[in-house]
Amino acid sequence: MVEGIRDFSRRQFVGSLAVGAGALVAGQTVSASAASSSRSFKGSDIVELGKTGIKASRLAQGTGYNGYNRSSAHTRAGKAAFDKLMRYSLDQGVNFIDMADLYGSHPFVRDVVKSLPREKYVLLTKIWPRKADWVTPSGGAKEEIDRFPKELDAEMIDVCLIHCMTNDKWPTEFARIREELSSLKEKDVVRAVGVSCHDFGALKVAAEHPWVEVIFARINHKGGKEFACDASVEEVSETLRVARRNGKCVVGMKIFGAGKLVKPEEKQASLDYVFKNDLVDAVTIGMLKVEEVDDTLKHMAAVTG
């Protein structure tokens, strides 16, 4: 699926990577507050993720397009294609890697980053909390987080989210997961915690809840169910402003409407909207081809004003 990729130069790759995971950065670091003054919205900009102390590229490489049953379009493309795509994104300075147990992407990512210094990339993954054909959750987080680092060959996960919150009762429903994630955070196994939201009620609770540090939120300039958002663009935007005021890191997803906003002008309008309105710290996009990586970076660099 990935064709025409240029030869990968390890020297260029290591030299071009911005430092993640809270280390000092030799290149440009842009805090969330500084973004408004600098007006730089490049995908390779290193930004602070809320108040977590973690620094990552403004663009995250998603690994879960059409993800289900521990597979995704990324993993189904095969190891060689996955490796080339991920290495290309990293080579462009996109060091924020978005994974989930649902996607089955942990071992694929492990093989890409295994030879790199740990500070050169930021790992985000998600716990699926509901029983399904492919998984029987423990009901907490310790069992999963014992498995995830082994799959990733990493002692520490930067961000772990509870995946796909679908109602406003999630803090109670998944209280044990929250408690165990907090315990793991105290032991420096996980650096930051939060939720990904697929419901407006869930999002509103996340924006205010003191436990939440990182929110994955569905947002684009169109809004509404038709474009894979949880409410109107005005309602979601105001909720994200609340979250940001409360110090939460917001990572925007479905920026291109789950594949419904694919014209160049639509992509640009959506990126312009989320960044110019300071709704997000970063965005995650499930780019499948190196051409899509280049295209996304081009559009992000064009966000001005």
Image: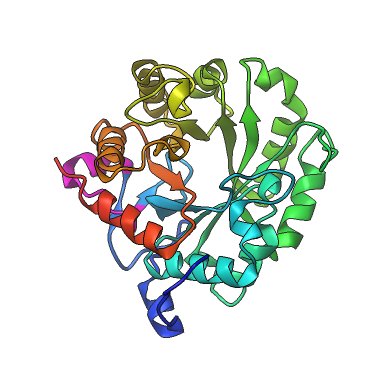
40 part of magenta stretch: yes
Whether residue 293 is visible to the viewer of this picture, yes or no, is yes
What residue lies at 76% left-to-right and 61% top-to-bottom? 150
In the rendered image, residue 99, in percent from the top left (x then y), is placed at 60, 51
What residue lies at 65% left-to-right and 64% top-to-bottom? 108
Task: Pick whichever, 82 or 282, lies toward us.
Answer: 82
What residue lies at 36% left-to-right and 64% top-to-bottom? 25
Compared to 165, does 66 lie above or below? below
In the rendered image, residue 289, in percent from the top left (x then y), is placed at 45, 61
In the rendered image, residue 299, in percent from the top left (x then y), is placed at 26, 50
Task: Pick whichever, 138 or 24, lies toward us.
Answer: 138
Q: Quadrant of residue 27?
A: bottom left
Whether residue 45 is visible to the viewer of this picture, yes or no, is no
Q: In screen coordinates, is 261 left or right of 63? A: left
Task: Pick whichever, 126 or 209, lies toward us.
Answer: 126
Q: In the picture, which quadrant includes the C terminus?
A: top left
Compared to 22, does 186 lie above or below? above
- Give the residues in magenta: 32-46
In the rendered image, residue 68, in percent from the top left (x then y), is placed at 69, 43
What residue lies at 82% left-to-right and 43% top-to-bottom? 134
Compared to 285, does 161 lie above or below? above
